[in-house]
Amino acid sequence: MKILLISPTWKKKVANERLKRDRIFKFPPHSLLAIAALTPKDIEVEIIDENIEELDFNRKADLVGITTMTASSPRAYEIADEFRRKGIPVVIGGIHATALPEEAAQHADAVVIGEAEGCWERLLEDFKRKGKKGLAQFYRNSQLPDPSKIPIARRELLEGKGYLLSRFLQISRGCPFNCSFCSVSRFFGKKYRFRPVKNVIEEVKSIVGKSLKTRFLGFLDDNIVGSVSYAKELFKALIPYRVLWAGQSSINIARDDELLDLAARSGCKGLFIGFESVSEDSLGEANKLQNKIGFYEKAVKKIHQFGISIEGAFIFGFDHDDKSIFQRTVKFIERVKLDAVQFTVLTPLPGTKLYEKLEEEGRITDRDWSNYDFTHVVFRPKLMTPEELRQGLTWAYQRIYSLPSIFRRLAGSFSGGRWRYSGPILALNLAYRRTFKGAEV
C-alpha cells in the first residue's frame, strides 16, 4: 500500500512562478512529516511539496492526502479532483479544511478536521478494512490530542529535495490570546499544550550533528515563550547541545532578563515577533492586548543586547489605519533597526473573528481563496481604498528593502555581537529585495 502526501502550491497558473521563488523562503511541510510518522511502517509514504517540485498525476498511489491553507485551497481542490477522476481516493486536512469542512468534502472522500493525531490512525484502519467505501466523510477528535504522543517527524522523506533549512520542530500547540485575525486558536485550541522537554531533547539529539548546517534548528511554535517556566526548562536543556536556533516569540520575552539570557545561551540567534501595528487603536481592534507599543523600542534594544536578531511582522489595513500608517511603520522600523521585516495585508481567514465581523458588515469583496495570501486586498478598508492599501504595502516593502534601508538597519548589528551572524541576515534581506523589487507584491 502506498500513500502520497501533497503540500499544494497556489493556483495552477502560478505554480511555475512559485517554483522559482528564492530558496530561503522554502520550508518543509512539517504537518506532512508528522502524518508520515503516524503512518504504520508497512505502508509506503511519499511526500510531494509543490513549492519546490512538480506534481506528476501519473504517480501510483492507493490513497492521496492533501494539507491546505486558505490561499492554496483552490490548487488543493484541483489536485484532489484530478486524482479522484483517476479513481484514487483523496483525504483533505489542514487549517482551511477545518474551518470549512463542508466545502472541502466536495472535493474529497474524507476530511480530517483539526489535529491529525488519532484521526489519521482511525482513517487508515477504515481504509485498510474496506477501502474507499470504508472512509467516513469527516474525522475529528473528541478532545485535543496529548502532545506527549506526537512522534518524531520523518525527515528522511525530504532528503535530496533541496531545502536550504530542514530541521524544524514543534514543541507546543494552542494559543490563549485569540487575536481577531488569527486562526491558530480555532485549529489548535485556546490553551497551550506542551510536549515534554525530554521528548523534545530526544528529537534534537536525533537530528543534530557536528556540522553548522545540522546544528541549526527552527521552532515552528507561534510563541515559544508562551509558558515562561516551560521555556526556561527547555532552554536550559538545550545548552549542552550547542545548537543555533530561531523561532517565534511574543515581544514580552524582553520583560524577563533571565529568560532572554537562557534563550541566548541555548543558541537563539533570531526571533520572529508579531508587532502587528504601531497604532494602539489597531492593536485593540485586533484583540492583541498583550502588545504594548510603549514597550516596543525598549524591548527591541534589549533583545538585540542579548545577541538575538529580530524579524518583525506588521499588518496593514485595520479599521483605524489611514494612509499615514505605512510611513509611520517604516520610520519605526528604521529607528529601532529591526533586522528583517514582513508586511502583510489584513486578511479575513475563514474561522476567525475578523472574518465573522467583515462578513456581518458586508465588507468582504473577494471569495477567490487564492487571493487570501496576505498580499491581496479582499475586503473594503475603512480609511483608505483597496488600491491605496495595496500600493502602501508595495511601497513599504520596496522602501524597507532598498539598499540604504538595509544597511541603515543592519548597521545596528554590532549590538550584542550579532555581527557574527550578519551574513544570513543580509542574505534574508537580499532575498526579500529580490522578491519585491520593481514588481507587484
Image: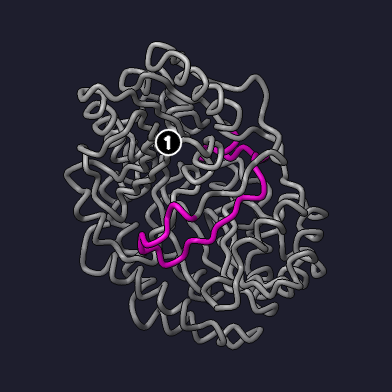
Image point 21% across, 68% down: which residue? Answer: 438
Considering only vertical position in the picture, is 302 above or below 414? above
Residue 256 located within the stretch drawn in magenta: no
Amino acid type, residue under disc 1 in the picture: Pro
Q: Secondary structure at mark 1?
A: loop
Instruction: Report the side of 441 relative to 67 (left or right).
Output: left
* Nearer to the camera, 332 or 48: 48
Instruction: Report the side of 211 relative to 104 (left or right).
Output: right
x, y percentage for residue 91?
40, 26
Q: Residue furthest front?
A: 42
* Nearer to the camera, 106 or 210: 210
Please state the extent of the stretch shown in magenta in the rendering: 156-185
Inspect this view and state whether residue 336 appears. Answer: yes
What residue is disc 1 on?
348
The main secondary structure of the magenta stretch is loop
Image point 76% across, 53% down: which residue? Answer: 197
- The quarter of the image holding the N terminus is top left
- The quarter of the image holding the C terminus is bottom left
Residue 171 located within the stretch drawn in magenta: yes
Q: Residue furthest left?
A: 13
x, y percentage for residue 235?
75, 64
x, y percentage for residue 7?
37, 43
Inspect this view and state whether residue 356 appears. Answer: no
Image point 50% across, 54% down: which residue? Answer: 155
Instruction: Report the side of 93 relative to 205 (left or right).
Output: left
Image point 41% across, 25% down: which residue? Answer: 359
* Nearer to the camera, 220 or 2: 2
x, y percentage for residue 196?
76, 48
Considering only vertical position in the picture, is 299 above or below 98? below
Q: How is the image coloured?
A: one colour
Number of numbered callouts drawn: 1
Which quadrant holds residue 118? top right
